[in-house]
Amino acid sequence: MRAAVIYESLTGNTRRTARLISEELAGAGIECSVFPVTRVDYQALADADMVIVGSWTDGLVFIGQRPGRASRLRKLPVLAGKRCLVFCTYAINCGATLDKLTRIMEERGADVLGGMAIRRDHIPEGAKEFVERLLEAIEV
């Protein structure tokens, strides 16, 4: 099985999370590639059985939360037929970020199986839990 992890990061927290997710997947025997949303390897994306997309949470502390730079995520290629999981990183409150990220990926044609919000001060634990949930969802 092959996975592609695509992320949008502002301060580096989402990039770090994406890389830790990739390492956890590799430890589970899943071949994984990691790309910022601005430099996606389209061949690796086409070859992937699963796509994982992550973003930071933008917006005010308690209202208006959304995926950071969502316009970049909306420009991803069509993901028709691809299984997808989403994650977001946040500081205080992720609000509806996961729901909005899910909708963006569904608009790109992905079959979103679920997602998880990961607090920025719990990234290693969050990445590990995300992969555990992912493995349960896809029944590897």
Image (cartoon, rainbow, N blue to C red):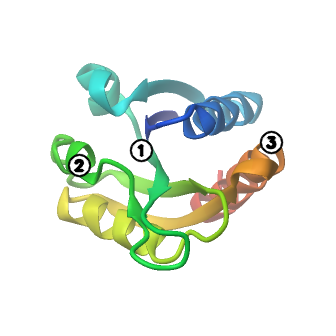
Q: Quadrant of residue 104?
A: bottom left
- Which numbered disc covers residue 41? none
- Which numbered disc covers residue 79? 2
Nearest to N terminus: mark 3 or mark 1: 1
Badge 3 vs badge 1, beta-carbon distance below 8 Å: no
Q: Is residue 34 left or right of residue 18?
A: left
Task: Please state which amino acid type lies under the numbered disc 1.
Answer: Val
Q: Nearer the viewer, residue 119 or 75?
A: 119
Instruction: Say few, some or many: other residues with alpha carbon within 10 Å of mark 3 (under 14 / 14 to 19 / 20 or more).
Output: some
Task: Please state which amino acid type lies under the numbered disc 2.
Answer: Leu
**Residue 82: where, in percent of width, then height?**
32, 51
Residue where numbered disc 3 is placed: 124
Residue positioned 83% across, 49% down in the render: 125
Q: CA distance from mark 1 to mark 2?
A: 9 Å
Residue positioned 49% across, 26% down in the render: 34
Nearest to N terminus: mark 3 or mark 2: 2
Identify the element where label 2 is drawn. Answer: loop
Residue where numbered disc 1 is placed: 51
Instruction: Say few, some or many: other residues with alpha carbon within 10 Å of mark 1 (under 14 / 14 to 19 / 20 or more).
Output: many
Residue positioned 56% across, 69% down in the render: 94
**Residue 51: where, in percent of width, then height?**
42, 44
Identify the element where label 1 is drawn. Answer: strand
Q: Is residue 51 left or right of residue 25?
A: left
Residue positioned 20% across, 49% down in the render: 71
Identify the element where label 3 is drawn. Answer: helix
**Residue 36: where, in percent of width, then height?**
40, 28
Q: With respect to residue 132, does 61 lie above or below?
A: below
Task: Please state which amino acid type lies under the numbered disc 3.
Answer: Pro
